[in-house]
């Protein structure tokens, strides 16, 4: 029984090492989504070719960052599942 408790404790610590980065990624994802929302709102207020081009580029950059973070989070979640 002692061995089982020790293994269980180690599993908990290993899961924490995996879930902490996932929580951090989720936080970054939330920030990126908020920034995207702010840029879209600002783009609706301002007009002009230069402003629209800049906003479109920033939106594309943030969408790419969101997709990258979603993929990273999914990979970390898969890693957590296979380790437990």
Image (cartoon, rainbow, N blue to C red):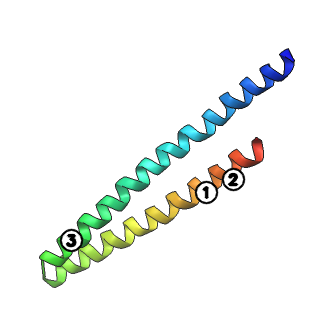
Image x and y of residue 78, in percent: 69, 53
Structural crowding at the residue carrying mark 2, measured as other residues with C-alpha within 10 Å and reported as few (<14), some (14–19) or many (≥20): few
Distance of mark 2 from mark 3, alpha carbons? 35 Å
Asked whether the beta carbons under mark 2 and mark 1 sit within 8 Å of each other, the answer is: yes
Q: What element carries label 3?
A: helix
Q: What element carries label 1?
A: helix
Give the vertical position of 76 relative to 5 (above or below): below
Asked whether the beta carbons under mark 2 and mark 3 sit within 8 Å of each other, the answer is: no
Image x and y of residue 33, in percent: 36, 61
**Mark 1 or mark 3: which comes first in sequence?**
3
Residue sitting nearer the eye, 40 or 11: 11
Residue 16 in the figure: left or right of residue 84: left
Q: What element carries label 2?
A: helix
Asked whether the beta carbons under mark 1 and mark 3 sit within 8 Å of each other, the answer is: no
Image x and y of residue 11, in percent: 73, 31
| Outermost bottom residue | 49
Give the vertical position of 77 relative to 41 (above or below): above
């Amino acid at each position: 029984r002692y061995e089982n408790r020790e293994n269980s404790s180690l599993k908990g610590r290993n899961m924490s090492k995996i879930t902490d980065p996932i929580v951090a990624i989720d936080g970054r994802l939330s920030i990126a989504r908020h920034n995207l929302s702010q840029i879209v709102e600002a783009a609706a207020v301002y007009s002009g070719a230069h402003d629209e081009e800049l906003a479109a580029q920033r939106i594309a950059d943030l969408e790419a960052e969101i997709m990258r973070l979603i993929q990273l989070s999914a990979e970390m979640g898969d890693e957590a599942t296979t380790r437990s």
